[in-house]
Image (spheres, rainbow, N blue to C red):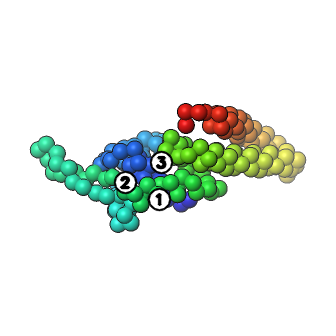
Amino acid sequence: MEAVTMYELFVLGELSIQAKHGYELQFMLKSSVGPIRQISSGTLYPLISRLVKSGYISQRDELQEGGRPRKIYELTENGRQRFIDLMAAPLEYNTDIELMFHFKMNFFLYSPVNVQSATLKQYLEYLQYNLSYITDMESQVAVKQEIPERKRTQVLRMFSHRKAISKAEIVWVTEEIERVKHDTNI
C-alpha cells in the first residue's frame, strides 16, 4: 500500500473509534509514526478532504468557546467498509511494511480474528523472507576476498545485527499468532 493509503487506514481507523477534529488526528498520527517521520498538515488535510469527497467521512462544524468553529470528522458507513477493506488487504513488501503492520495492529480490536491472523502471518512471511535474504548476503560477503578484511568484518557485524533483530521479531510475531489464535477475548 502506498503511503497515502496507509494514512487513510490510520484516519479511518481512528474515526471508527470516535469522531475527532483534524488537530487530534494529526497529533495521533504524528505520535504513531514516531519522532523521525514527519507528517505535515499538507499531507493530512488534503487526505481528509479526499475522504470527505469520497463519502468515507463526514464533516461538521463545532462551536468553540470564544473562537471560530472547528471541523469535526466522523466515519460514514462507506468509510467503515473502506476501513474493513483496508484492514483485510494484504501487506505489501515495501519500505512502509513495518509502519503499515503497526497501523493495522493498532486497530486489531476492530477487526475479525481471521484478519488479525492473516496480517500477522503475512508479516511473519516478510520477516522470514528478509532473514533469508540477510543470511544469503552474509554468506556471499564472508567469502568475497576482494573486500578488505576490516570492511568485510564490519559488514558481517552489520548483518549479524540485522539477523538478531529479524530473529527477535520472528519470535514475537510467532507468539502473537498463537496468542490471537487462543485469545477468547478478541
Instruction: Give 118 or 43, whichever is nearer the viewer.
Output: 118
Residue at the image point whose x is 27% and y is 51% from the top: 72
Q: Position of residue 172 (x, y in %)?
A: 66, 34
Residue type for callout 3:
Arg
Mark 2 falls on what kind of element? strand
Which numbered mark, 2 or 3, is in the foreground of this view? Answer: 2
Q: Earlier in the sequence, mark 2 or mark 1?
A: 2
Q: Which mark is residue 75?
A: 2
Residue type for callout 2:
Leu
Is residue 138 shown left or right of residue 29? right
Q: Which residue is mark 3?
A: 37
Residue at the image point whose x is 68% and y is 46% from the top: 121
Quadrant for the N terminus in the image = bottom right
Q: Which mark is residue 82?
A: 1
Residue at the image point whose x is 24% and y is 55% from the top: 60
Quadrant for the C terminus in the image = top right
Give the image quarter of residue 91: bottom right
Tell me if residue 168 comes above or below residue 88 in the rendering.
above
Residue at the image point whose x is 21% and y is 54% from the top: 61
Category of crowding for the residue at label 1, using alpha-carbon neighbours closer than 10 angstroms: few (below 14), some (14–19), many (at least 20): some
Tell me if residue 27 comes above or below residue 79 in the rendering.
above
Which numbered mark, 3 or 1, is in the foreground of this view? Answer: 1
Category of crowding for the residue at label 3, using alpha-carbon neighbours closer than 10 angstroms: few (below 14), some (14–19), many (at least 20): few
Q: Position of residue 26 (x, y in %)?
A: 36, 48
Tell me if residue 93 comes above or below residue 154 in the rendering.
below
Cα distance, mark 2 to mark 1? Answer: 10 Å
Category of crowding for the residue at label 2, using alpha-carbon neighbours closer than 10 angstroms: few (below 14), some (14–19), many (at least 20): many
